[in-house]
Amino acid sequence: MPTQSPRLLLGAQVSIAQHISLALERGASIGCSTIQIFTKSNRRWDAKEITQQEVSDFQSMREQFAISPIIAHATYLINIGSSDKQILQKSISALTKELERCALLDIPYLVLHPGSFKGSIEQKCLDQIAKSINSVFEGHTGKTRLLLETMAGQGTSACYKFEQISYVIGQVSSANKRLGVCLDTCHVFAAGYDLRTSKTYHEMWQQFDKTIGIDKLYAIHVNDSKKELGSRVDRHEKIGRGEIGLKAFELLFNDPRFFGVPKILETPDGTLEDYAVDIRTILQLLSAKTRKILGVKNEDF
């Protein structure tokens, strides 16, 4: 679990269009202190090599706008739990390359959708995910930590239960140093974990800590849900406009246990203007005590 000086770590998934370093400028323009990016096109397996000039520009922009940490998200094409040998090999290769790109850009975290078991069974998929991660880590020794994202359980996607993620982590030989978790609020809600009241919110985190360990949490995706509790349908909604509602986010953003964990918006539309609205909504949920601790000023609203 990250430990940083207390400040509001709130950001969004921002575009790398035209130049990867522009993502930092875009994030800063709406008040992000942290951001998430794809380091390449999310719709392709291959990628253009990152040049040394791009690395230099990226680092300069990071220092200029004081955005940290930066999180990368692996392409959704990757399925390291696949029973299809061709897709599996392409996925392992692509994940290794994504980690290499993160290393070049000095990005500490790479979020991954763990995998799906189409054409197989769930347990075999979990075993294959762990086996694939071990293979990737054997071939890549960089510092970037791979974060398994909690999933909604839509279709044949695996790792929608805390026990499933815990199982995968337990099967990875270097898990403590190189593997972590990214919790998605929409996904866990759709998977059946209620966080809408103080009671259920704390029960959910107690279960997470008992099963996985809060010390393994390195990022949170902050999304409301279009669908109801336990629907196992992955449909994000803007903050406070979905089935989760504002109370859960009020509890989360005022919870001192997670002040040092970066929180990333992936709400619908994904324009800077839309993210700015969600950021203002979240700022209004902060208590006076939290604002003081995190240094949030009235002019930030």
Image (spheres, grey):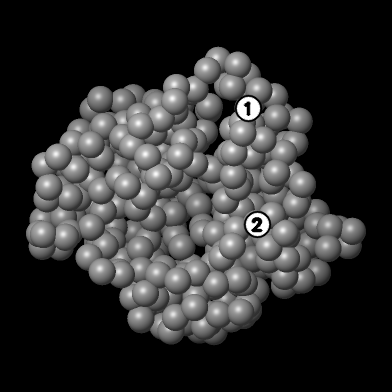
User: In this image, 166 relative to 292: left or right?
Assistant: left
Residue 279 higher or lower than 65, as above or below: below
The residue under the point 54% across, 43% down is 37
Q: Residue furthest right?
A: 299
Amino acid type, residue under disc 2 in the picture: Thr
Find numbered disc 1 in the image and state the secondary structure of the residue it sits on. helix
> Which residue is at the front of the view, 149 or 297?
149
> Which residue is at the front of the view, 231 or 7?
231
Q: Nearer the viewer, mark 2 or mark 1?
A: 2
Q: Position of residue 256 (x, y in %)?
A: 63, 62
> Which residue is at the front of the view, 219 or 100?
100
**Residue 127 circle label:** none
Quadrant housing the C terminus: bottom right
Question: Counting other residues with Cα less than 10 Å from the Cα at mark 1, is it few (<14), some (14-19), or many (20 or more)?
Answer: many
Q: Position of residue 152 (x, y in %)?
A: 36, 68
Residue 220 higher or lower than 186, as above or below: above
Amino acid type, residue under disc 1 in the picture: Phe
The residue under the point 58% across, 21% down is 55
- Report if residue 255 is visible in the image: no
Name the image quarter holding residue 48: top left
Name the image quarter holding residue 54: top right
> Which residue is at the front of the view, 2 or 8?
8
Question: Counting other residues with Cα less than 10 Å from the Cα at mark 2, is it few (<14), some (14-19), or many (20 or more)?
Answer: few
Q: Position of residue 90 (x, y in %)?
A: 23, 36
Q: Residue furthest top?
A: 52
Q: CA distance from mark 2 to mark 1?
A: 21 Å
In the picture of the structure, the residue carrying the numbered disc 1 is 58
Find numbered disc 2 in the image and state the secondary structure of the residue it sits on. loop
Is there a contact, CB below 8 Å, between mark 2 and mark 1?
A: no
In the picture of the structure, the residue carrying the numbered disc 2 is 271
